[in-house]
Image (tube, rainbow, N blue to C red):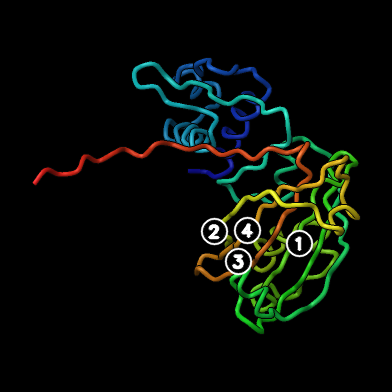
Amino acid sequence: MPKAKFEGIYRSIKQKIEAQDFPYQSLLPAESELIAAYGCARNTLRRALAELTADGYLQPIQGKGVRVIWRPVGKTAFLIGVIESFQETAARNHLRTVTKVVQFEQVSADERLASQSGFMVGEPLWAIQRVRYLDGKALILDCNYFSQDMVPGLTADIAARSIYEYIEKVLHVRITTTKRKVTVERATTRDEELMDLNGYDSVVVVSSMTFDADGLLLEYTQSRHQPEYFCFQDTATRRRQIPAREE
């Protein structure tokens, strides 16, 4: 199946849903109509619809069709269950972005950082702080630690653009899994210095441990968010409950 064909159909239907050409709670056109409109094979269309279902845009209804379940959230939406770079999130939310690197240095993990991050004591790391501006406002402070062994050659210039793009397209490392924890914490002096907190005395902190395809830790990050402009969303499904067997 040509990847470009599948991705083009996925993006087209996604854009139509977000533009509300396919409104919330409406049914998509019949499968035969979509196949004719996109000039694609049935399996190609079904793969695109399956991906949109997994991303929380659609819900197949047996015997009826496919219902649109996506609604605009009104704020910048960060996806908990998806690994996205900052640039990818900004593009999805149609926001103008600037990244300012305020710290870039080489450190060794001490016991406190090792306990917090999952890196080994003494492991060489890139320590990076980046302020993320969305539509001209300093709304995120990213505090990143990347393994120097797994992400060699990192520079401040790369950090100002996209570290994930460098990892995947230059180093050819496959990023596969992230474990996340979301907390609300009191704003630090550093938060107040670098972010537009607009009177808030707390920040939303997303702590992430990210692994490659071999299960090796390559990144630990704390993303510190100004609360007013952000929401975090995910799509969850209820697991089928298996009755306990009677003895």
Which label was assigned to residue 208?
4
Q: Earlier in the sequence, mark 4 or mark 1?
A: 1
The residue type indicated by label 4 comes to Ser
The residue type indicated by label 2 comes to Thr
Of residues 36 and 220, the one nearer the viewer is 220
Please tell me whether mark 4 or mark 3 is closer to you in this view: 4
Q: Which residue is mark 1?
A: 143
Gap between marks 4 and 3, in whole Å?
Answer: 18 Å
Please tell me whether mark 4 or mark 2 is closer to you in this view: 4
Of residues 31 and 220, the one nearer the viewer is 220
Gap between marks 3 and 1, in whole Å?
Answer: 21 Å
Q: Earlier in the sequence, mark 4 or mark 2?
A: 2
Q: Earlier in the sequence, mark 3 or mark 1?
A: 1
Q: Is residue 130 left or right of residue 14?
A: right
SS under mark 2? strand
Q: Which residue is mark 2?
A: 176
Gap between marks 4 and 2, in whole Å?
Answer: 13 Å
User: Label 4: few (<14), some or many (≥20) within 10 Å?
Assistant: some
Please tell me whether mark 2 or mark 1 is closer to you in this view: 1
Q: Is residue 59 left or right of residue 13?
A: left
Residue at image location 71% in from the left, 47% down from the top = 204
